[in-house]
Amino acid sequence: EEEKKKKKQPQTVTFGSNEASSMVKQLRQSFKSGKTKSYQWRVSQLKGIAKMVEERESDIVQALYQDLSKPPLEAFVAEISMAKSSCREAIEGLQDWMKPEKAKTGISTYPSTAEIVSDPLGVVLVISTWNFPFLLSIDPVIGAIAAGNAVVLKPSEIAPATSALLSKLVKDYLDDSAVKVVEGAIPETSALLDQQWDKILYTGSARVGRIVMAAAAKHLTPVVLELGGKCPAVVDSNVNLEVAVRRIIAGKWQCNNGQACIGVDYIITTKDFAPKLIEGLRKGIEEFFGKDPMESKDISRIVSPAQFKRLVGLLDEDNVSDKLVLGGRRDSTRLKIDPTIVLDPPQESQIMQEEIFGPLLPIVTVGNLKESFEVINSKPKPLAAYLFTEDEQLKQDFVENVPSGGMSINDTILHVTVHTMPFGGVGESGMGSYHGKFSFDAFSHKKSVLYRSFSGDASLRYPPYTPKKQMV
Ligand code: NAD
């Protein structure tokens, strides 16, 4: 009913191209004034974010609950504490990150010194998504500010409570002349994309990623695209089953109920081991979410009726619905679907073709795990890939033969928390990366500067090109 009412209301767009253009002008002036470049400004803004997260934690948890019925502990672990640590790392690292990096020079420029200077890019745009709507909005903003840019954040309209909260909090805690939030959906995002930016970081689907990249191309604006894909988990029979299933469940249902870009999309295991693994998963799911997971408070709901309908469609496809081995119940009023496992759906079925982004887990069986590389590599490159095994050779082969954005071996998700490593996709799962110092780098231009003195000016390099010079 609520949804219907909302749809009937005329959509008024208060933020169009004119508003976007004057906002960018204002931000450009702020950037040109030089204030965002100073270390003091950057740190004060980062401290502002840290303070905001600290003081408004309960509002953030509440907004995430409203948008996704995200369990408070999950909100804290996967969004709030990650944002806090990202902020802390930036504050602690900033002085070092900003220092020009010395570069070696050779005989051709002798005598000289050289350094790589990290220049702020200017005015940048961050477009975010709904599944981790707080973290995935604020984390790129931390990088943009650390690198000395003015920034506009466009959170996802599909997580409206978090979007509204971000808009309010950023005004209250940060410098409004250089950090802004624009709320809205396609019209507002399109108005923003018409403008000239110095960088765009987009998180979301590959379909919209293409729209963002095409808009950016008009202005030769570089982009970071944080997209998704079908992230596989290959499970060997020699694993500690109890630990492996817990980590798989954590990387699927515990993680926003499967609505996560690096969540496990499907499993590949051997025919022989599949029954044991399914039994292990069944037990593990019961241990985590009780006998009736639909009633568990420890699992998020599906974000929207549209996503619910899409997921039910994947499950109800012929040749998939008859492969059900666990779960399968759904409740459209509460937007809930059971943790659900299907065994060996055909590769041509939609559930094996598109990113699932929900609580459905296909298990694909093979004769030998080496065949898993073929299955994975027949699909676009995923954002993450997982392997559970004690076999060192298999680990090495997996790392060598599976091209993915990142990977965890014998675990899921956790590589994303290690901020000394870049986080990003490859191919269809995206381009560019961020996190930790990589966020600072993503929003900086690396300017090569060569310093020379007036001494040692070899005449050899100048015309006239006499035969004697040519001989040298
Ligand atoms: P979404 O619908 O929230 O869209 C993301 C953003 O794009 C929103 O801000 C939205 O307003 C904007 N948008 C939507 N349509 C647009 C259009 N036609 N023109 C301009 N802007 C538009 O999110 P989604 O796309 O449903 O997100 C899910 C996808 O995001 C999945 O593929 C997932 O894997 C990926 N994802 C990636 C990461 C990552 O870090 N790599 C993180 C989370 C999600």
Image: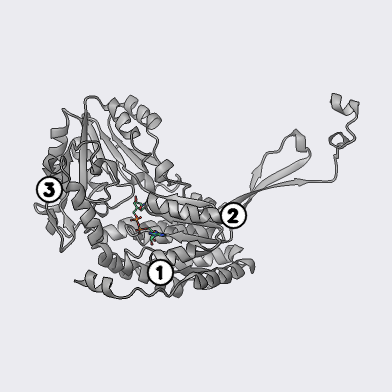
Q: Secondary structure at mark 2?
A: helix
Disc 2 residue lies near ligand 1 with CB under 8 A: no
Looking at the rendered structure, the kind of residue marked 3 is: Gly
Closer to the camera in the image, 33 or 104: 33
- Residue 418 picture location, percent across and down: 40, 47
Q: Residues within 10 Å of mark 2 (few under 14, many from 20)?
A: some
The quadrant of the rendering that contains the C terminus is: top right
- Marks 3,2: beta carbons within 8 A: no
Q: Quote the CA–CA distance across marks 3 and 2.
A: 52 Å
Q: Which mark is residue 183?
A: 1
Q: Is residue 233 above or below residue 82?
A: above
Q: Which residue is mark 3?
A: 327
- Marks 1,2: beta carbons within 8 A: no
- Residue 395 picture location, percent across and down: 34, 29
User: Which is closer to the viewer, label 1 or label 2?
Assistant: 1
- Residue 425 picture location, percent across and down: 42, 44
Residue, far left:
291
The quadrant of the rendering that contains the N terminus is: bottom left
Residue at 27% x, 50% y: name it.
357
Looking at the rendered structure, the kind of residue marked 1 is: Glu
